[in-house]
Every structure is written in C-alpha cells, then in structure tokens.
Image: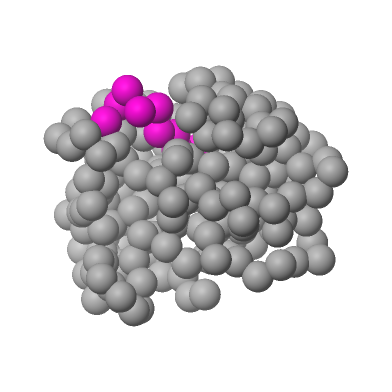
Amino acid sequence: MIDRIQWLGHGGFMLQGPPLIYINPWRVTRSIFLADVLCISHEHYEHFSLGDIEKLRGPGTQIITNASVAALVDGATELRPWQSMTVDRARVTAIPAYSVNSAHHARERGGLGFLISLDFYDIYYAGDTEITAEMDLLHPDIAILPIDGDSTLTVSDAVEVVKKMRPRYAIPCNWSANGPGAALSDALAFKAAVGDRCEVVIPTV
C-alpha cells in the first residue's frame, strides 16, 4: 500500500485505488483519471481549492468534507467527527483535527483528518492538527502527519504521535523544498528522531 500513496505537495495526496482517492489536492495538473473520492479536510486555501476540485471531479466523484466546505461545494457530503462513509472498497472515517493553542485551527472550526481503510490497511491522514486526545484511539498502519508547526504538529510532536500510534509507516507532510515553513531538513530530522520505531517515507512530488 505504501507505494500506492503519492504526495501532491504540501498537504495533498493521491491514493491509488480502486477507488482513486485524492486528499486536499492543491495546484494539481488536470488528469484523465478522475477521482472516485475527494477528501477535503477544512477550508484553508492550501487544502480547499475549488479549481483543483473541478480538475479532478467527475460525474460520480464523492466529495467528503466538513460542514464549512460542504456549504460551498455542490453535492459534497458532510461528515461529522467519527462518522464513516463507504465508497467501493474504501471506508472513510472523519477524525477531529484541531489546535488547542491557536484559533487558526480551533476545534469549533470543524477541521477534519481522515482514517481511510483500504485493502486491509488503515491510513491516517491527520490534517492540520496538534496532538489531540482522539489520537490515543487510533493505531493505523500508515500515518500521514504534518510537521510544519503552523498551529499543527511540530517535528517533535509528530515523533510523539508515532510513539503513541506505532504505525508501520509514517509520511511527513506540510513541508516543501522551496518557500517558507517546514523544509526537507525538517522531514529528515523527523525521520532521524523516529529511528527504528517505524519506517519513515519522505515523499517526493
């Protein structure tokens, strides 16, 4: 499964199916392979892009998101925390994603992460979140974790999440080789700090 997960940059990912699942696509190129599922975690521009949604949306695409985004996208399905939706062979469960220290990702804003169960793997996409009590309930095979510390997990926080969840694989996101914020050096620092607790896969676009 790990080789079927493609990073799209920042917080965007594609999971090769079936079904074909995109999470928070941003600045993607138009594809002949339209999404079966689009998961949008919250309304911030680098995670919710109507232009990118339209590039990937087909007549049968299921858009799964929170209340704020569902109000802006025709035909989207709102999931509340811990609700699940099944599409083909995948089950998508909404997981609360929030910051306890910043209004930028305050809990009442309704941000989500996603637990995607596909082909006997549980893939946890944390979304923009700090460490939360809800994480104690999750033990995924693959954990996709932000490391930028922008009201989200820092590198050291992400290491603590790995210690809690004990996934087989961890993928750091919300970093870039260019521009401000977390960089490749942060992803490498995360990998070094995780050590042999799990296999850290540093993605490339």
Q: Quadrant of the N terminus?
A: bottom right
> Which residues lie in the magenta part?
106-114
Q: Residue at x 56, y 56 (%)?
A: 25
Q: Is residue 152 above or below residue 135?
A: below
Q: Residue at x 64, y 51 (%)?
A: 53
Above or below, comparing residue 134 to residue 9 in the picture: above
Residue 183: image location, x then y, percent: 28, 73
- Does the magenta run of residues contain 109? yes
Q: Position of residue 120 (x, y in %)?
A: 65, 42
In the rendered image, is residue 74 in sight?
yes
Q: How many marks?
A: 0
Query: Which quadrant of the figure has residue 34?
Result: bottom right
In the displayed structure, 124 sits above or below 28; it is above
Decide: is 167 above or below 147.
Answer: above
- Out of 160 and 37, give the one closest to the viewer: 37
The magenta stretch spans residue 98: no
Q: How is the image coloured?
A: one colour
Q: Residue at x 40, y 33 (%)?
A: 111
Residue 188 seen in this snapshot: no
- Residue 4 percent across, percent down from the top left: 64, 62
Q: Residue furthest bottom?
A: 178
Determine whether, in the image, residue 60 is placed left or right of residue 175: right
Q: Nearer the viewer, residue 75 or 93?
A: 75
Residue at the spot x=58%, y=34% of the render?
72
Q: Is residue 40 left or right of residue 134?
A: right
Q: Position of residue 170 (x, y in %)?
A: 40, 56
Task: Locate residue 62: give its quadrant.
Answer: top right
